[in-house]
Image (tube, rainbow, N blue to C red):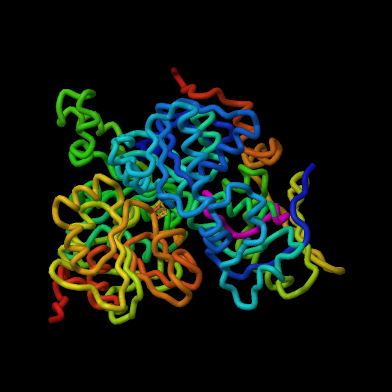
């Protein structure tokens, strides 16, 4: 019987089957950030087990609240920093070198096709874009991963989502994944791995594929996975060039991680993206999705462009193109967070930061910032934010605040309008004078 | 051997997420005990007041997809430090469910129809208790003079985690660091 990508990765990493439906896998890498790792570190210390399975395979970053905003966040950073030093964890990224984990770690080449990686963060699923199995886990799983380099999972059940057709202009991977979540619901993929397939996914660059995989957890998925191809090779080439004769050879080797033609999926869903239009969420759940057109005119107080979903260079390019030479609505507070220093520098070189500043945006340093309502852009009771992030839960960006999730193009257009609006990149949108 | 639960509260909403169970603004705490006053602070539920309704609570009975969203184990800890070691629901989000068992807490999945029945019979009554007996594989829910018994099955791995006291205890005994099958 043919195998899915996840089944192949599971078999290659199997350490133990403690029960019929449970697989304990060895991990190629363990990722850490300053919110969920310190409790794991303290727990290990308390038990007299302050060890790491392999310092070279542990990567750590301070990204959620950085630079520290108060004594408590300073302590979280310090616990992680001291631990990284004490165990010789070289890939530790602190202020000035840090960025949003799920953008920074792929950028550093830490995720490769066929890898099994965990992190104490639900959006670790983003990294599946590289043909890897990268589920988010809790702190106890993380503690065991740090100590032993293993993690337990149920037998993989895979759901195949085929995106056919071509994304129309002004419609992006973000709209595609919102369409998927809107269709299958917030628990539509619970306990399942989503394997993406189809020409629209093939056509996406790695950044778009990361956006796609990033939000699979909003449908309950363990992880999203894309098959690794030439684009994966190109993205990773500077890190893997020593391992392969040339790019072609790398792409051929990565085919090992393609699903078999007769792989068995528990469920298959097909969406033709050619007919998609820009989408946004309207409630407190990410499956409450509507066409932007139906939400147009909804007043907003803040716009956030950033996060592990849409804080990459391609996202900033699109948003900057929409606001270039114009000014955002006087009532709107615009916040742009380039996700990593590399993206920030590139955006600066390309003049995007200038575009944002001219338009009246505040451009912050790389951080999760407003995404989870812990720093740099918390909403007040009753305020509304148009956001390129991934969660619109009640209170997510501040108690009593409302979050509408959308693409960077839509968020930028909404910033100009002072209300939810389609971007001029989408045909059928008339540009306001 | 072990029982979980006691005085029970019903939360009549599906998709209760971990941001609602413990909001991000409290994630700056590195010690579990500090989470105690903030459990379910952001839950939007008609007539629900966490301070009043969770006092003395030892078990929660809720609707589908409980614990979805953020991976924060702080959600399971916030329950634990409040003395809640049992949550009963038709389904759980994967990470939250694993976090419960990893910490030696019981996330009990029952058929939606059985949960519906419990809600209909007991949700509006005061003094209801819910106790899960692992050995007997039985959940008892009820109050004065009226008790409903719902049988349940628990996977071998979950049972082993509860018996070991959690995943850290279990894994520490069983695995060596960094070893892979076949080298
Ligand atoms: S950007 Fe938001 S969703 Fe992504 S890792 Fe940071 S807090 Fe989590």
The residue sitting at the top extreme is B183
Q: Residue at x 31, y 78 (%)?
A: A331
Q: Nearer the viewer, residue A185 or A236?
A: A236
Q: Residue at x 34, y 46 (%)?
A: A99
Q: Where A208 sits versus B135, above or below?
A: below
Q: Where A318 sits versus A263, above or below?
A: below
Residue A430 point in image, percent of width and height: 14, 78
Task: Please identify the quarter of the rendering in which residue A413 is found.
Answer: bottom left
Residue A330 point in image, percent of width and height: 27, 78
Q: Where A257 sits versus A338, above or below?
A: above
Residue A240 in sight here: yes
Magenta extent: B82-95
Residue B84 highlighted magenta (yes or no): yes
Residue B110 point in image, percent of width and height: 64, 57
Task: Please identify the quarter of the rendering in which residue B171 is found.
Answer: top right
Residue B148 in sight here: no
Left or right: residue B28 versus residue A388 is right
Q: Residue at x 32, y 51 (%)?
A: A366
Q: Nearer the viewer, residue A179 or B29?
A: B29
The residue sitting at the right extreme is B145
Q: Quadrant of the C terminus of chain A?
A: bottom left
Q: How many marks?
A: 0
Q: Where B1 sits versus B116, above or below?
A: above
Q: Nearer the viewer, residue A198 or A283?
A: A283
Q: Quadrant of the N terminus of chain A?
A: top left
The residue sitting at the front extreme is A71
Left or right: residue A224 versus residue A399 is left
Residue A333 point in image, percent of width and height: 32, 71
Left or right: residue A362 versus residue A427 is right
């Amino acid at each position: 019987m043919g195998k899915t990508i996840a089944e192949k990765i599971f078999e290659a990493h199997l350490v133990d089957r403690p029960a019929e439906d449970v697989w304990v896998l060895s991990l190629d890498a363990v990722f850490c950030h300053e919110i969920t790792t310190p409790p794991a570190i303290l727990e290990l210390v308390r038990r007299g087990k302050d060890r790491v399975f392999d310092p070279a395979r542990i990567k750590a970053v301070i990204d959620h609240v950085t630079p520290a905003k108060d004594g408590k966040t300073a302590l979280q950073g310090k616990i992680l920093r001291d631990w990284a030093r004490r165990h010789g964890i070289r890939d530790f990224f602190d202020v000035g070198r840090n960025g949003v984990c799920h953008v920074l770690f792929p950028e550093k080449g830490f995720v490769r096709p066929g890898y099994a990686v965990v992190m104490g963060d639900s959006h670790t699923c983003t990294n599946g874009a590289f043909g890897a199995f990268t589920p988010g886990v809790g702190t106890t799983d993380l503690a065991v991963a740090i100590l032993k380099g293993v993690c337990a999972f149920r037998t993989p059940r895979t759901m195949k989502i085929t995106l056919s057709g071509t994304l129309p202009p002004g419609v992006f991977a973000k709209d595609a994944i919102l369409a998927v979540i809107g269709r299958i619901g917030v628990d539509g993929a619970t306990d399942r791995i989503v394997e993406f397939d189809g020409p629209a996914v093939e056509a996406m660059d790695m950044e778009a594929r990361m956006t796609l995989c990033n939000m699979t957890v909003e449908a309950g998925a363990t992880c999203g996975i894309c098959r690794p191809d030439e684009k994966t090779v190109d993205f990773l080439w500077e890190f893997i060039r020593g391992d392969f004769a040339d790019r072609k050879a790398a792409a051929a080797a990565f085919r090992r991680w393609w699903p078999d033609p007769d792989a068995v999926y528990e469920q298959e869903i097909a969406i033709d993206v050619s007919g998609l239009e820009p989408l946004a969420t309207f409630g407190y759940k990410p499956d409450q999705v509507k066409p932007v057109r139906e939400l147009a005119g909804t007043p907003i107080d803040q716009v956030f462009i950033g996060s592990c979903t849409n804080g990459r260079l391609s996202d900033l390019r699109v948003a900057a193109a929409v606001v270039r030479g114009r000014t955002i609505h006087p009532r709107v507070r615009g916040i742009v967070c380039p996700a990593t220093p590399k993206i920030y520098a590139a955006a600066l070189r390309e003049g995007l930061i200038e575009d944002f500043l001219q338009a009246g945006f505040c451009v912050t340093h790389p951080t999760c910032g407003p995404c989870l309502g812990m720093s740099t852009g918390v909403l007040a009771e009753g305020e509304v934010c148009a956001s390129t992030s991934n969660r619109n839960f009640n209170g997510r960006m501040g108690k009593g605040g409302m979050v509408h999730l959308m693409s960077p193009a839509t968020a930028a257009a909404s910033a100009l309008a002072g209300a939810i609006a389609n971007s001029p990149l989408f045909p059928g949108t008339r540009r306001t004078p | 051997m072990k029982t979980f639960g006691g005085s029970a509260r019903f939360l009549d909403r599906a998709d209760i997420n971990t941001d609602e169970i413990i909001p991000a603004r409290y994630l700056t705490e590195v010690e579990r005990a500090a989470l105690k006053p903030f459990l379910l602070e952001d839950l939007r539920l008609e007539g629900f007041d966490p301070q009043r309704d969770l006092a003395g609570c030892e078990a929660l009975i809720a609707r589908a997809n409980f614990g979805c969203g953020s991976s924060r184990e702080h959600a399971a800890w916030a329950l634990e430090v409040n003395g809640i070691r049992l949550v009963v629901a038709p389904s759980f989000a994967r990470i939250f469910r694993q976090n419960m068992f990893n910490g030696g807490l019981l996330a009990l999945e029952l058929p939606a129809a059985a949960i519906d029945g419990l809600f209909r019979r007991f949700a509006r009554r005061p003094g209801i208790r819910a106790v899960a007996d692992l050995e007997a594989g039985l959940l008892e829910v009820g109050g004065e003079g009226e008790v409903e018994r719902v049988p349940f099955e628990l996977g071998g791995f979950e049972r082993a985690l509860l018996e070991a006291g959690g995943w850290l205890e279990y894994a520490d005994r069983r695995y060596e660091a960094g070893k892979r099958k076949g080298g």
